[in-house]
Amino acid sequence: QIHSLLTQRFGANAVFQTTIGRSVRMRELTVTHRTVFEHEPAQPQAEQFLSLVKEMINRASKGEFTVNPLPKLE
């Protein structure tokens, strides 16, 4: 729902397609002082973070093969 609201507000070109799911496992990270990549039960969220980083790098590169580049801000 939040992703949909952000897309409506800012447009599809300004909102990343990758979303990070919420879970109890993510809250456990604060208590255990571990990263999402070190906590096995949080593996789905770790993969989502990696996907987001790849999308960010791709959109920021603005190269010939860039998919959905970030819009120019005025």
Image: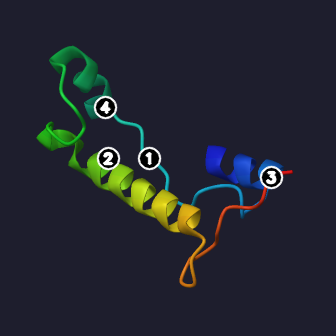
Please tell me whether mark 4 or mark 3 is closer to you in this view: 3
Kind of residue at badge 1: Ile
- The residue under label 3 is 73
Whichever of labels 3 and 2 marks the residue nearer the N terminus, that label is 2
- In the rendered image, the vertical position of residue 62 relative to residue 57, given as above or below: below
Kind of residue at badge 2: Gln
Kind of residue at badge 4: Met
Whichever of labels 1 and 4 marks the residue nearer the N terminus, that label is 1
Residue 19 appears left or right of 46: right
Whichever of labels 2 and 4 marks the residue nearer the N terminus, that label is 4
The tally of labels here is 4
Residues tagged 3 and 1 counted as in contact (Cβ below 8 A) = no
Residue 39 appears left or right of 29: left
Whichever of labels 3 and 1 marks the residue nearer the N terminus, that label is 1
Characterize the local packing of mark 3: few (<14), some (14-19) or many (20 or more) Cα atoms within 10 angstroms.
Answer: few
- The residue under label 1 is 20
Residue at position x 35%, y 35% in the image: 23
Q: Is residue 1 visible?
A: no
Q: Is residue 39 visible?
A: yes
- The residue under label 4 is 26
Question: Which of the numbered marks, if any, corresponds to residue 45?
Answer: 2
User: Which is more toward the observer, 64 or 34?
Assistant: 64
Residue at position x 78%, y 59% in the image: 72
User: Which is more toward the observer, 49 or 71?
Assistant: 71
Percent of width and height locating residue 56: 50, 57
Q: How many angstroms separate mark 2 from mark 4 (CA)?
A: 8 Å
